[in-house]
Image: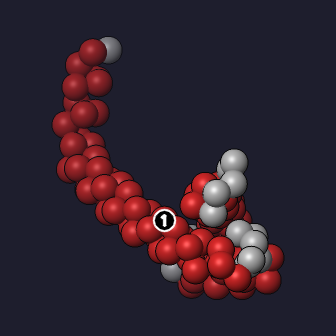
Amino acid sequence: MNGDVDEGDAILAEVRTRIDALDDALVDLLAQRFAAVAQAARLKQPYGIPPLTPRRFAAVLTRVTGRAHERGLDSEAARRIWEAIHDEALRLEARVMGGTG
């Protein structure tokens, strides 16, 4: 069975390298996105704008799920991913704005 694993590793090496590079790019993009979220939180704070703005998030979900569909991705999977990203963004905004998030 160990030979099967070795063969599988060899067969998948190229695609795994590509996946690893894409993962790195996603992390880099998330870092940029969260830096922008922190900037938004700093801009919101003096005006008392809350971290959660439901209308904005609804618009983001509509745009993202539409783009996912156009690109052949599962829209519901994209929605779940963006909901997780949004939850983390809210925690970051709360921290930046001095909350407990």
Q: Is residue 38 or residue 84 the one in the foreground? A: 38
Q: Is residue 65 or residue 24 the one in the foreground? A: 24
Q: Is residue 22 or residue 58 the one in the foreground? A: 58
Which residue is the extreme one toward the right? 54
Location of residue 89 in the rendering, given as x and y in whole percent from the top left corner: 60, 62
Q: Residue at x 48, y 65 (%)?
A: 34
Location of residue 46 in the rendering, given as x and y in whole percent from the top left corner: 65, 78
In the image, is residue 38 above or below residue 6? below
Q: Residue at x 52, y 68 (%)?
A: 38
In the image, is residue 37 above or below residue 22? below
The image quarter containing residue 92 is: bottom right
Position of 58 compared to 31: left or right?
Answer: right
Which residue is the extreme one toward the top? 1
Position of 64 compared to 16: left or right?
Answer: right
Q: Residue at x 40, y 69 (%)?
A: 32
In the image, is residue 97 above or below residue 13? below
Position of 95 compared to 47: left or right?
Answer: left
Position of 58 compared to 32: left or right?
Answer: right
Q: Residues within 10 Å of mark 1 (few under 14, many from 20)?
A: some
Q: Is residue 65 or residue 50 the one in the foreground? A: 50
Amino acid type assigned to the residue bearing label 1 in the image: Phe
Residue designated by label 1 = 34
The image quarter containing residue 42 is: bottom right
The image quarter containing residue 61 is: bottom right
